[in-house]
Image (spheres, helix red, strand yellow):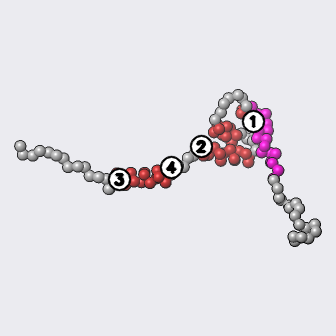
């Protein structure tokens, strides 16, 4: 109803930025769980994700997200290469199989 007084524009329900979730912003909320991570050791990201994933004091939703993030490091795809690598690999399989080049003839001198 454009043009109607009091009905054009204004705030809409559900519009704007969503508030941050305070539960997930505090990743580790107990002293026992922070002691394992904050012991002064340098850790790689995979080790950190596995500690968060296996910690029962951490929020279950955060543990699932850590497991999903760690899965890409532990379980790689069988064909992480691109189309060119797959094409070259199939060409090598064909070349070594039935259509492989034959051995050249042996050059033996006969009759002297």
Nearest to the observer: residue 68 or residue 102: 102
Nearest to the observer: residue 97 or residue 32: 97
In this view, the residue farthest toward the top is 40
Q: Tell me the crowding category of disc 2: few under 14, some 14 to 19, or many 20 or more residues within 10 angstroms, Cα based.
A: few
Q: Which residue is mark 4?
A: 81
Query: Looking at the picture, how far across and down is residue 88, in whole percent?
Result: 42, 51
Residue at 69%, 47% in the rendered image = 65
C-alpha distance separating marks 1 and 4: 39 Å
Mark sitting on residue 55: none
Judge whether residue 27 is colored magenta: yes
Query: Looking at the picture, how far across and down is residue 49, in whole percent?
Result: 67, 40
Q: Which residue is mark 3?
A: 95
Q: Tell me the crowding category of disc 4: few under 14, some 14 to 19, or many 20 or more residues within 10 angstroms, Cα based.
A: few
Mark sitting on residue 73: 2
Q: Can residue 90 be seen from the camera position used here?
A: yes
Mark 2 and mark 1 lie on one chain; the one further toward the N terminus is 1
Mark 3 or 1: in front is 3
Whether the residues at callouts 4 and 3 have beta carbons within 8 Å, the answer is no
In this view, the residue farthest toward the right is 5
Q: Is residue 64 left or right of residue 25?
A: left
Nearest to the observer: residue 111 or residue 46: 111
Magenta extent = 18-35
In this view, the residue farthest toward the left is 112
Judge whether residue 19 is colored magenta: yes
Mark sitting on residue 33: 1
Mark 4 and mark 2 lie on one chain; the one further toward the N terminus is 2
Mark 4 or 2: in front is 4
């Amino acid at each position: 109803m454009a043009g109607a007084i009091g009905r054009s524009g204004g705030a809409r329900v559900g519009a704007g930025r969503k508030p941050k979730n305070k539960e997930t912003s505090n990743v580790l909320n107990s002293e026992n769980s922070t002691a394992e991570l904050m012991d002064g050791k340098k850790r790689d990201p995979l080790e950190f994700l596995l500690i968060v994933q296996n910690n029962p004091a951490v929020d279950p939703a955060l543990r699932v997200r850590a497991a999903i993030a760690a899965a890409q490091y532990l379980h790689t795809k069988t064909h992480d290469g691109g189309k060119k690598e797959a094409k070259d690999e199939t060409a090598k399989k064909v070349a070594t199989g039935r259509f492989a080049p034959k051995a050249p003839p042996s050059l033996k001198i006969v009759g002297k």
